[in-house]
Image (cartoon, rainbow, N blue to C red):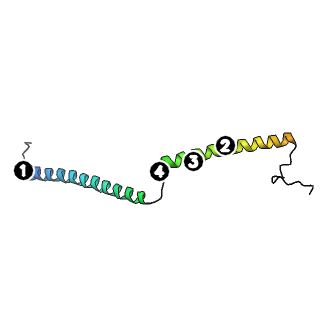
Amino acid sequence: MPQTRNPILDDMARLMTDAAGLAQGVKREAETVMRTQLERLLSTMDVVTREEFEAVRDMAILARDENERLQARIAALEAKLGADPQNDAGVDPSI
């Protein structure tokens, strides 16, 4: 079967290809505008970045571990000295 060229169909195909490219361009532009607006909105709010949050979380974990280590050390020292751990205020119970 011989293949014929139809200029109308070629023009329609070219038009559809251009329309698809235009739609992708519009989509990219809309995403860029939305991202810019969202970043501007977030910059006016009091929020932290993911990196800042993770850094503070890591610091809190280290501080908690250090606190637990120090509590165990204090308990061991109090046990060694025979101190009353219930008497945290340093008040003489004989008074």
Q: Is residue 91 above or below residue 81?
A: below
What residue sits right under mark 1 in the picture? 7
Q: Label 4, label 3: how many angstroms apart (C-alpha)?
A: 12 Å
Residue lying at 14% horizontally and 53% vertically, measured from the top left: 15
Q: Nearer the viewer, mark 2 or mark 1?
A: 2
Label drawn at residue 65: 2
What residue sits right under mark 3 in the picture? 57
x then y, percent, for residue 5? 7, 46
Q: Do the CB atoms of the residues marked 2 and 1 lie less than 8 Å apart?
A: no
Amino acid type, callout 4: Thr
Q: Mark 3, residues whose alpha carbon is within 10 Å: few (<14), some, or many (≥20)?
A: few
Pointer 4 or 3: first along the chain:
4
Q: Secondary structure at mark 2?
A: helix
Q: Label 1, label 3: how many angstroms apart (C-alpha)?
A: 66 Å
Pointer 2 or 1: first along the chain:
1
Label drawn at residue 49: 4
Residue lying at 55% horizontally and 48% vertically, measured from the top left: 56
Q: Nearer the viewer, residue 24 or 67?
A: 67
Q: Secondary structure at mark 1?
A: helix
Q: Secondary structure at mark 3?
A: helix
Amino acid type, callout 1: Pro
Q: Nearer the viewer, residue 73 or 27?
A: 73
Amino acid type, callout 2: Asp
x then y, percent, for residue 53? 52, 49
Quadrant where the C terminus sits is bottom right
Pointer 4 or 2: first along the chain:
4
Q: Nearer the viewer, mark 1 or mark 4?
A: 4
Amino acid type, callout 3: Arg
Residue lying at 81% horizontally and 40% vertically, measured from the top left: 77
Q: Label 1, label 4: how many angstroms apart (C-alpha)?
A: 56 Å
